[in-house]
Amino acid sequence: MTGHQQLQRRLGVFDATSIGLGSMLGAGVFVAFAPAAGLAGSFLVLAVLIAGAVAYCNAVASAELAARYPASGGTYVYGRKRLGEWPGFIAGWGFVTGKSASCAAMALTFGNYVAPQYAVPVAVAAVVALTGVNLLGITRTALLTRILLAVVLATLVFVAAASIVGPHPAGVPMGGDASDAGAAAGSVHANLGGVLPAAGLMFFAFAGYARIATLGEEVKDPARTIPRAILAALAAAFGIYLVLALLLLNHLSPAGLAATATPLLDAVRNSSLAAGSPVVQAGAAAACLGALLALITGVGRTTLAMARERDLPGPLARVGGKHTVPFVAELAVAAVVILLLLTTDVMTVVGFSSFGVLIYYAVTNAAAYTLAEHPAHGPRWLNVAGFLGCLLLAFTLPAASVLGMAGVLAAGAAGRFLVLRFRR
């Protein structure tokens, strides 16, 4: 990385936590709940618990490594430093490709909430606008993230209130008889096999704290700030997901939750607070924008790191402008996301992205295992548990997701191999 212009350290604990939490809430609440409920049914809460446990292992490993290597790029950098060039490349390539697809999905979700008839043009406009914000500097990114996060949290409180007050038209009636209980037990048993695939999809929702690690070069006092921000963002997101999963299952029922693409909006529409539906639509739009903003930022920084090591074209490593930003990488990411929006069905990428990110965190845990010292809350055996947990969740995802992302990883590895041969 010698000779490359460095980014500036401008983010404190609150800003870094906000970026991570903003990314997790947008992805989890508005993308992952419904397909996960379709797989796990009444066991959705168990899937959230499993995903949260694996996420904790990964968060601890990420925090240890980010404090030691506070540079842009996250696990791409850690993998190269601790394990070698190839593990680092696989982690970085999986993150950049999987999260580029996630950016497109989040942008289209925003378009569907704001103007369903013009979802794609609105999504493209959102990508252009948020890329413009990122080019104004990381402090502008953090400020907008804080504003959007405040709107999202207020919306989630309103949705929780609507789910509590009811009525619950799609829920299981209170005081059901023995036959009701038997039918429910049969349904739960039928969905038990879907818990691990559902946990893999829900992990998509917890991956936002990776944004904090990828911003390591722009965080003040990284050895102290990064671990605190990562664990704080994860703890807040886990509590919110767990409460929402319980409330939505009770209010909409497992089948109702699985059948809707807008679970939070349906929760309000099917309650005595239905008049507040526009509030939820506005909050959903804000959540999608917050997640998209953080995603674009994280992918851009990982692209920058890979370009510095010549694993991506060198011009992508350029940093400049009044606000010292990786402007070439940011513009390239925006161009790829817009291309995906215009040419593919991006709403099918949740599992695809989850597989790539789970492989990314498997490398994180393996890298953390090689460290000589570990904190009391993150012993070495936790890295083993995180590594095995990531692989278990990755390979129990739907086959199409596994095969699709495995093909992308293989293509990237083959491309790198040929480039290295050509250079020699």
Image (tube, grey):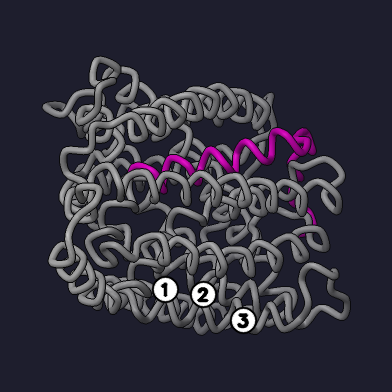
Q: Secondary structure at mark 3?
A: helix
Q: Residue at x 17, y 55 (%)?
A: 255
Residue pointed to by mark 3: 385
Q: Quadrant of residue 55?
A: bottom right
Task: Point out the stretch of residues depicted in magenta.
Answer: 1-30
| Residue 329 % position (x, y) | 52, 45
| Residue 377 % position (x, y) | 79, 67
What predominant SS class does the magenta segment belong to?
Answer: helix
Q: CA distance from mark 3 to mark 1?
A: 28 Å
Give, as a three-letter code, the residue at label 3. Answer: Ala
Of marks 1 and 2, the one in the foreground: 2
Residue 298, labelled with which disc? none
Above-or-below relation of 345 to 381: above
Q: CA distance from mark 3 to mark 2?
A: 20 Å
Label 1 Cα crowd, 10 Å radius (few <14 / some 14-19 / many 20+): some
Residue pointed to by mark 1: 412
| Residue 253 % position (x, y) | 23, 50
Earlier residue among tags 1 and 2: 2
